[in-house]
Image (cartoon, grey):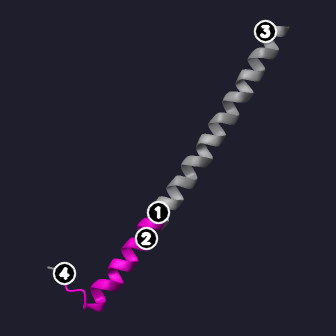
Amino acid sequence: MVDWTDTEFLAVLIFDITAIIIAVWWISGRFTSKMHEVEERMSRKDSETVAESEE
């Protein structure tokens, strides 16, 4: 069982939870950035395709 009065355990637990939160925040930011980049690239590709078909 967990000893909730152990300060070393609580410090490590808080550190681990903080590290996981930061990692999830960072990865979600990278994922969102990459999705915006892909959407922008696809919209540019679509507009180039439309311009080529009009010529």
Spatial CA span between label 3 and label 1: 45 Å
- The residue carrying mark 4 is 2
In whole angstroms, how far apart are the C-alphas of marks 4 and 3?
68 Å
The residue closer to the viewer here, 41 or 32, is 32
Label drawn at residue 19: 2
**Percent position (x, y) of residue 4?**
24, 86
**Which residue lies under the disc numbered 1?**
23
- Of 7 and 34, nearer the camera is 7
Residue segment shown in magenta: 3-21
Q: Residues within 10 Å of mark 2 (few under 14, many from 20)?
A: few
Frontmost of labels 4 and 1 is: 4
The answer to whether mark 4 and mark 3 are in CB contact below 8 A is: no
On residue 40, the disc is none
Say which residue label 3 marks.
53
Label 4 is placed on what type of residue?
Val
Q: Position of residue 8 (x, y in %)?
A: 29, 89
